[in-house]
Image (cartoon, rainbow, N blue to C red):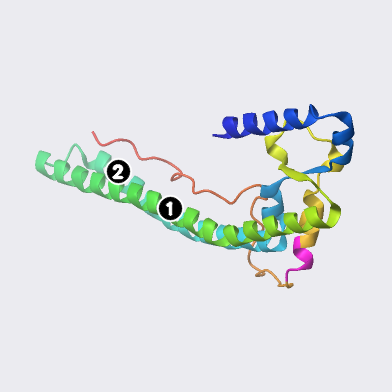
Amino acid sequence: MNLVRYALASALALSLLLLSSAASAQMKFAVVDVQRAVMESEDGLRAQATLKKLFDKRQQELDAKQNALQQARDDIEKQSKVLSKEALARRTEEWQRAMVELQGTFVEFNKELQKKQGELTQPILNKVISMLRQLAAQDGYDAIFEKNAVPYARSDLDITDKTIQLYNAGTPKAEPPKDDKKAPAAKPPAAKPPAAKPPAAK
């Protein structure tokens, strides 16, 4: 999908360059890193802090369950020589069910994060697009391209910082929660697998 988008953007850029020099001289273009504009706006930074807080809370829950499963697995291995076959089979089956449940919880955790990310970032994206339309009308741009979809653009054509400034100028100031730390700027955190996967039941 990204390759197709890149090819289309490249073809469009090439066709524009092939216009007559007179027409080209009259046209004005710009590029913008939409993702950075979204995530580095004041609203975007607050959204990242909210996502990180949710991520950390859920990750702690997953880690606790993971550690409990690992301990249970170790106990089964230690007692495997003294347990009857029936007891060993029962303990192993219980462990396997708990492992499947943990994996399901992990999947639901990822879905929850993705849903929350969309809820928080979609309104910001819509506003950024509005800012770009405003900039295009204000500064006379004929077209504004996604920076990451074109093979090359001069640095002076990049209006990402200007877009962020315009966005923030229309955003009410709000202090972020004191306990929240800034999440990575490029993208919201994604759930990681449990720290150590228990060995498969024998």
The reply to whether residue 56 is visible in this rendering is: no
Please tell me in which quadrant of the rendered image residue 16 appears. top right
- Identified by mark 2, the residue type is Arg
Which residue position holds label 2? 73
Q: Position of residue 94 (x, y in %)?
A: 21, 48
Label 1 Cα neighbours within 10 Å, binned few <14 / some 14-19 / many ≥20? few
Which residue position holds label 1? 111
Residue range (magenta): 167-171
Please tell me in which quadrant of the rendered image residue 14 appears. top right
User: Against 143, is 65 above or below?
Assistant: below
Q: Which of the image's four quarters has the C terminus?
A: top left
In the image: residue 145, left or right of residue 124: right
Q: Position of residue 131 (x, y in %)?
A: 73, 58
* Mark 2 residue element: helix
Identify which residue is drawn at 43% across, 41% down.
196
Identify which residue is drawn at 16% across, 40% down.
82
Question: Looking at the magenta stretch, what is its main secondary structure?
Answer: helix
Label 2 Cα neighbours within 10 Å, binned few <14 / some 14-19 / many ≥20? some
- Identified by mark 1, the residue type is Lys
User: Against 7, is 178 above or below?
Assistant: below
Is 169 magenta? The answer is: yes
Is 158 magenta? The answer is: no
In the image: residue 102, left or right of residue 54: left
Q: Earlier in the sequence, mark 1 or mark 2?
A: 2
Q: Which of the image's four quarters has the N terminus?
A: top right
The reply to whether residue 25 is visible in this rendering is: yes
User: Against 121, is 193 above or below?
Assistant: above
Q: Position of residue 36 (x, y in %)?
A: 70, 49
Please tell me in which quadrant of the rendered image residue 17 appears. top right
